[in-house]
Amino acid sequence: MPATPYTIGVLALQGAFIEHINLINKLKIPKSQLVLGENKDEVVIVTLAVRTKEDLERCDALIIPGGESTSIASIATRSGLLEPLRAFCQDPLKPCLGTCAGMILLAEKAEGAKKGGQELFGGMSTNVLRNGFGSQLESFESPLILSPLLNTFLPPPSTTTSDGEKDPLPPFNGMFIRAPVGMLLPSPSATTLQILASLPFQPKPDNPSSSIVAFLEGKKMAISFHPELTAGVPGGGRFHEFFVRGVCLGGKGVGVGREA
């Protein structure tokens, strides 16, 4: 019996969508792990650039890339895609990954929006501060503290040291470009957030959660930096691989926030 297509859409209205598509297409996931649900149905991962409601209807999961969140929302509104995107993102069974601008769009509330407000897709119980890390000129790269959960679904290292031990994955640096700062809401669902990555410093002294730069809530995953820009380094695709293996394909212990 042929494998069933599992379609991961990448919102392609504006921003760095092609980088996400290329990264997903390059993931090398063993065939034995490409199974879905209790029945362990065999699937094959396919990607789709999402520009219309019809495109979105074909998707099992969605990636919202970095870019300009107000522009993405404005184009979605003009193209009749805003409400379908809200319905998709707010469905607790639909896996979604938002990076940078995508993290803003998945939030319940965004501070620092332009005059007239900010249209959001929703789906997560978080509040974010737009451009919380500063302007384009204040963009930076930093090593991250990664949660062990992130490595749960990654393949074992393929190289060995001189004494025969497996090489650990190299450290991961996040690239922050006009990045949003997460401000976790004091709501019951906020307690289900699973932290995936943090900065080794606290950028906002008055906001203890400002060092958290990647987190999971149910099947919604938000990242304030640009993981698609590290695809060319060893272990650079680990956030996307975690999204596919752990969130989309339902890894044990992952994606249990709002559905618990």
Image (cartoon, helix red, strand yellow):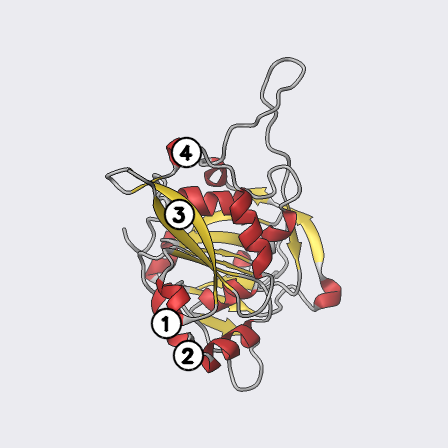
Q: Position of residue 164 (x, y in %)?
A: 61, 14
Are the two marked residues, 3 and 2, in contact with CB atoms closer than 8 angstroms?
Answer: no
Residue position marked by numbered label 3 in the rendering: 247
Pointer 2 with pointer 1, Cβ within 8 A: yes
**Lower sequence index among marks 4 and 1:** 4
Q: Earlier in the sequence, mark 1 or mark 3?
A: 1
Side of 10 where 236 appears, left or right: right
Give me the disc on residue 84: 1
Q: Which residue lies furthest to the left in this view?
A: 39
Q: What's under tag 2, amino acid-wise?
A: Gly
With respect to residue 94, does 171 lie above or below? above
Check residue 80 in the rendering and tell me which mark sits there, or answer none: 2
Instruction: State the mark number for residue 94.
Output: none
10 Å crowding of disc 3: few (<14), some (14-19), many (20+): many
Separation of marks 2 and 4 at Cα, in angstroms: 37 Å
Q: Quadrant of the N terminus?
A: top left
Q: Is residue 150 above or below residue 55?
A: above
Secondary structure beneath dot 1 equals: helix
Q: Name the residue under label 4.
A: 31
> Does label 2 or label 4 sit earlier along the sequence?
4
